[in-house]
């Protein structure tokens, strides 16, 4: 027997109501909710989570090398020559592989 969609939606809403309210209360301790009204949902998302686009130059400039390697090491130069042509999906996968973030 299938559960009606409306009932399933209500169950979902009830299950997350507590955590959502706790998040709202906690965030309102730091940010006046009135200030949030000036932002769109997309703008708030970018403020909270950052820009989803990975800047290649920033990625390269903030990479830490170990084991005697430097940005001038031949292998590192080759690595960045390949990575510079990556699309955002591959850059994201590489960043996740290297950092777990």
Image (cartoon, rainbow, N blue to C red):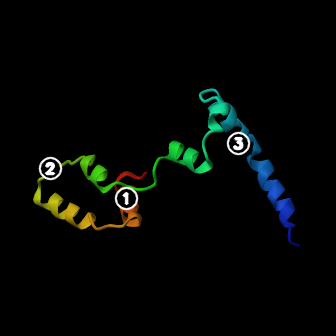
> Which numbered disc, 3 or 1, marks the residue that appears first in the sequence?
3
Relative side of 89 to 12, left or right: left
- 46 or 92: nearer the viewer: 46
Residue 35 sits above or below residue 74 on the image? above
> Which numbered disc, 2 or 1, marks the residue that appears first in the sequence?
2
Q: Residue at x 83, y 55 (%)?
A: 10
- Decide: marks 2, 3 in contact (CB < 8 A)? no
Assign a secondary structure to mark 1: helix
- 45 or 39: nearer the viewer: 39
Q: Residue at x 40, y 56 (%)?
A: 96
Q: Residues within 10 Å of mark 1 (few under 14, many from 20)?
A: few
Return the residue at label 3: 20
Q: Residues within 10 Å of mark 2 (few under 14, many from 20)?
A: some
Task: Quadrant for residue 3, please give it.
Answer: bottom right
* Residue that extends furthest to the bottom in the rendered view of this protein: 1
Query: Marks 2/1: CA distance?
Result: 20 Å
Relative side of 19 to 100, left or right: right
- 32 or 95: nearer the viewer: 32
Query: Marks 3/1: CA distance?
Result: 31 Å
Q: Residue at x 30, y 56 (%)?
A: 56
- 10 or 97: nearer the viewer: 10
Return the residue at label 1: 97
* Quadrant including the N terminus: bottom right
- Decide: marks 2, 1 in contact (CB < 8 A)? no
Assign a secondary structure to mark 2: loop
Residue 86 sits above or below residue 72 on the image? below
> Which numbered disc, 2 or 3, marks the residue that appears first in the sequence?
3
Return the residue at label 2: 70
* Residue that extends furthest to the front in the rendered view of this protein: 38
């Amino acid at each position: 027997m299938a559960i009606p969609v409306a009932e399933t939606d209500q169950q979902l809403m009830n299950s997350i109501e507590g955590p959502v309210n706790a998040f709202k209360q906690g965030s309102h301790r730091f940010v006046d909710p009135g200030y949030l009204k000036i932002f769109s949902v997309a703008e708030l998302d970018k403020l909270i989570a950052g820009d989803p686009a990975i800047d290649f130059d920033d990625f390269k400039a903030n990479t830490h090398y170990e084991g005697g390697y430097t940005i001038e090491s031949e292998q590192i130069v080759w690595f960045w020559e390949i990575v510079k042509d990556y699309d955002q999906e591959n850059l994201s996968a590489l960043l996740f592989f290297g950092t777990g973030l």
